[in-house]
Image: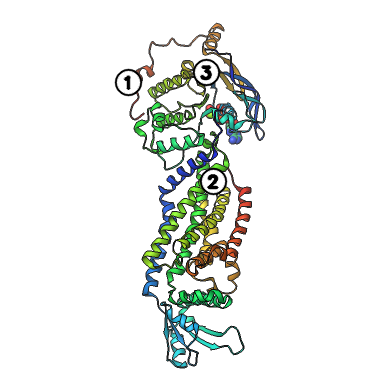
Amino acid sequence: MSKPYNNTKATLALAKASFRSIMRSPSAVVFTLAFPLIFILVFGFLGGGGVKVDLAIAPGSDLQNPIINAIEQINVIHIVKDKDADEIKAELEKGHIAAVINVKKNTSGTPAYLANVQYTSASIDKGSILKSVLANLMYTLNSKDIKPTVAQLNESTVQGRIYRTIDFILPGQLGFSLLSTGVFGTAFVFFSLRQTLVIKRFFATPVSRASIVFGEGIARIGFALCGAVFIILIGHFFFHFTLIHGVITVLNMLLLAIIGLVVFMGFGFIVSGIAKSESTIPPISNIITLPQFLLSGTFFSIDAFPSWLQPISRALPLTYLNDAMRKVAFEGAGLWDVKHQILIMAIWGIGVYIVAVKVFKWE
Amino acid sequence: MDKTNAIISVKELVKKYDDFTAVQGISFEVYENEIFGLLGPNGAGKTTTLEIIETLREKTSGEIIVDGYSVDKDASKIKRIIGVQLQAAGYYPNLNLIELMELFAGLYGVDIKPMEMLEKVNLQDKAKAKYKALSGGQKQRFSIATTLINSPKIIFLDEPTTGLDPQARRNLWDLIIDIRNNGTTVVITTHYMDEAEQLCDRVAFVERGEIIALDTPDNLIDNLINSGFERQKEVKKANLEDVFINLTGKEWREDN
Ligand SMILES: Nc1ncnc2c1ncn2[C@@H]1O[C@H](COP(=O)(O)OP(=O)(O)OP(=O)(O)O)[C@@H](O)[C@H]1O
Ligand SMILES: [Mg+2]
């Protein structure tokens, strides 16, 4: 043996080969970029003026308070004042108004204000948007209360900041894009490398199994991050997606993306191990991705879901990735502020990889 | 050429697939710098034997030493000094031949010029083509090129000429002889006896997992003649293969 075998070189060679291969594979590009972008375009244009949610202020409601002030800043919400109770009731029943809000000073201490929101079943879709916007608003307002030192800083930004649909939609789409690349991509690539005996030929070289896994992992993460940057930039420059601390925020989002991807790729390893044929990969992957697509707050805040669904939502890893992404992007949270979300993803990751090691097949 | 120095030694090799015994205790040696042929009918156990020596399959029992390394303990060292063409293998999808060569160079941890490797098997014109887009013969040649990347001491070729036209086959023989003349030991399996006769210094006949004969092609033929064997029909001075070669020319062709 002239010189020792170089595992890093092998890993990087594989990563490079895999990255090239992914870039030339239409399905990978469609999954990672096209789908999320389509949703972002649709919602981006809707959010940019199309959708207005009418929110009536109940007669007798307090008008000079932080809640109403903040709502007035949100351009998705159109405030309807000066209607009497009967008019409001009629409009609600027809669905012309999505909800009515009534803010009262709390005479018995904290919280300082109590807000009652009454939605209408005649306008469920707009009601959901309103719910998620309000939920987010409450979070920002309340966290100001909890940490008065931070509040000072937050206040100035909160009032100038406009919460657009894109601020909610983009992190969700990004999360889902990471989920599908992680699961589908990994499952397909390892299944087909095994089926087409590419891995067998690899095993005739001195490359280690770890190098194969890491090489593929690096390529997939690299590809997904390129996709993520692209999505974020499109969102930012065309639809005013909020990035509070600019580049820092983007970097934080990318770190979150890596954490999420590693977990999702674990699902992919499992799928590649249990799939009996190429055609069973999509259904099995869908069992993993679809519930998360629907229940993890990709389109609507999970607070808008019926209460019996919420525990399920709160068990899914994508929920926490989405949540962390939104906090980082819109609220300017650092990674330490979303440690709770990261912890839950890490727990998922450990569980998933324990299973993956058991079911993964090399030949 | 010193032919007594064994570079591969196989002793009492047994391979069981569940309750079916594919290889039943075979022993043989491959000498340094020879072309060694494994011959025998389908399912005889040739591929199984080769892949165990290549450290790709577990053996059930027996002992195998490759250039001083045991397959049990030093599999990764063996992998570094051998080149392997599998009877059935695939290559990374969506990559062209140059890129595949770069990948293998990385996997073996060596620096090579991909184009030079392709030139060795006359595939320089296909450098930008995908493996999938190659003809059968080109695929075989590419596979052989990948076995040469790490300048191996031994290469294993499992039916490298299956599916090739007569002249492509002959060109591949020339290539294999070249490789041997550069100091590499070659272990090859084939179903073509003319090929084994032309190429191999020694051949082993395997049947149902046992070696039933092992010698130089000349000795094996002489033994048969001495036992009183005669061909049924006197052969003509040329056969159809000679006609084919004569009609289509002997050089590498673009599309072979
Ligand atoms: N993975 C496997 N599982 C079970 N049986 C196997 C396996 N691989 C090979 N066999 C059996 O072992 C025997 C030897 O197979 P092998 O592939 O070694 O034959 P071979 O001599 O290379 O044949 P061929 O000339 O057709 O390539 C065959 O009967 C085959 O069915
Ligand atoms: Mg075989």
Q: Which amino acid does label 2 sit on?
A: Phe
What's the chain of the residue with tag 3? B
Rounded to the nearest whole Å, what is the CA distance between mark 1 and mark 2?
49 Å
Q: Is residue A213 left or right of residue A32?
A: right
Rounded to the nearest whole Å, what is the CA distance between mark 3 and mark 1?
31 Å
Q: Which mark is residue B249?
A: 1
Split into 4 quadrants, where in the image is the C terminus of chain A?
top right
Q: What residue type is labelled 3?
A: Asn
Residue identifier under label 2: A214
Q: In this view, does A36 lie to the left or right of A362?
A: left
Q: In this view, does A354 lie above or below A98?
A: above
**SS at mark 2 in the image:** helix
Q: Which mark is residue A206?
A: none
The reply to whether label 3 and label 1 mark residues of one chain is yes
Whole-percent x, y for residue B222 in the image: 53, 8
User: Does residue B254 appear in this view?
Assistant: yes
Whole-percent x, y for residue A155 in the image: 49, 77
Residue B42 appears in which quarter of the rendering?
A: top right
The reply to whether label 1 and label 2 mark residues of one chain is no
Q: Is residue A226 above or below residue A332?
A: above
What's the chain of the residue with tag 1? B
Which residue is depicted at the point 56% across and 51% down? A271
Which residue is depicted at the point 54% across and 22% down? B38
Residue B133 appears in which quarter of the rendering?
A: top left
Rounded to the nearest whole Å, what is the CA distance between mark 3 and mark 2?
38 Å
Residue identifier under label 3: B33
